[in-house]
Image (tube, rainbow, N blue to C red):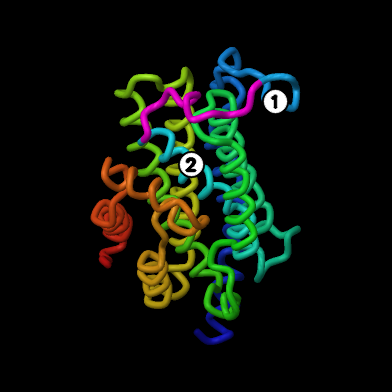
Amino acid sequence: MTSSTSEDLTLAIDKALPDIRAEYVDAGDAWQPHDYVPWDDGRNYAFLGGEDFTPEDVKVHPVVSNGLVLGLLTKDHLPSYHRLLAQHHLIESDWGKFVGHWTAEENRHAIALRDHVVVSRTFDVEQLEAWRLEAVTRGYRQYEGTREEIQVAQQIAMVMAHEALSADYFDRLADFAEKSEGTPAGLVTTLRKVANDDRVQLQYWGKLLDVALDVNEGYTKEALVEQARAASAIGAETAEGLDEARRVVLEAEIATPERDREVLNTLLARWGLTL
């Protein structure tokens, strides 16, 4: 990509962003995570005189508990995504405000999912915290050369591929949880809220992609296919020691390579593209 193309893309997107950001903020569902957490199910851990987690505490189906862990750790990658999206832009710009709002919504997802895990004891919270620290420290696609590889068109395409996979993942996990015994009150609704947010986010990142297509269609389409091919499955780039969780989720067909490919091809088909 020439510097002229890069500048043209940035200028066009900056010009379109105020209206797109206003629409995006208005379209959001300002739901409150605390409304859907069964706080009465919670109890103190040992530090405050209660009891620490034991495997016998888990009342939910293994697919639900492992699916929650992979989904939550993926949402915990938020700082890594934010770094990738902010690296070519001023944080005070309209791009910075758009990305900031998206970041806040994604953070709400992590808060909501973690509250469910902690209160309902659906997983060992100490192990979960160790994995969170590892995942966030390692980061998502943080390596030398990322800044050059992920320019504005790639930034938009990267998030779109991720959001498409995430929305499908949380919807399918909600479908499974709804039919399973032991699912905590409010969890299915929370999963649906997360999936719906992801779909709305995808819609407005798509509006930015349309702006880029008007500037340089060929280059932008190449970026979209490239980022769809590079997209990670939900829970894939998190921490070591999660092979069992991934196996459980895979066998339940919450997320499979075939399903992910179908989701991404559905996304690409809007622009006549395929993997």
On the image, the x and y values in percent for residue 237 come to: 48, 59
In the picture, the disc for residue 127 is none
Tell me where residue 266 sits by quadrant: bottom left
| The C terminus sits in image quarter | bottom left
Task: Give the spatial CA distance, label 2 vs label 1.
Answer: 22 Å
Q: Secondary structure at mark 1?
A: helix
On the image, the x and y values in percent for residue 185 come to: 47, 17
Residue 68 colored in magenta in the image: no
On the image, the x and y values in percent for residue 58 come to: 46, 26
Q: Nearer the viewer, residue 114 or 223?
A: 114
In the picture, the disc for residue 69 is 2
Mark 1 — residue? 46
Magenta highlight: main SS? loop
In the rendered view, tell whether residue 232 sits above or below residue 20.
below
185 left or right, relative to 78: left
Q: Residue at x 27, y 66 (%)?
A: 273
Of callouts 2 and 1, the N-terminal one = 1
Residue 52 colored in magenta in the image: yes
Tell me where residue 261 sits by quadrant: bottom left
Q: Nearer the viewer, residue 112 or 155?
A: 112
Q: Amino acid at mark 2?
A: Val
Q: Amino acid at mark 1?
A: Ala
What residue span does the magenta drawing correspond to?
A: 51-62
Q: Secondary structure at mark 2?
A: helix
In the rendered view, tell whether residue 51 sits above or below residue 109.
above
On the image, the x and y values in percent for residue 206 come to: 44, 55
Q: Residue at x 48, y 21 (%)?
A: 186
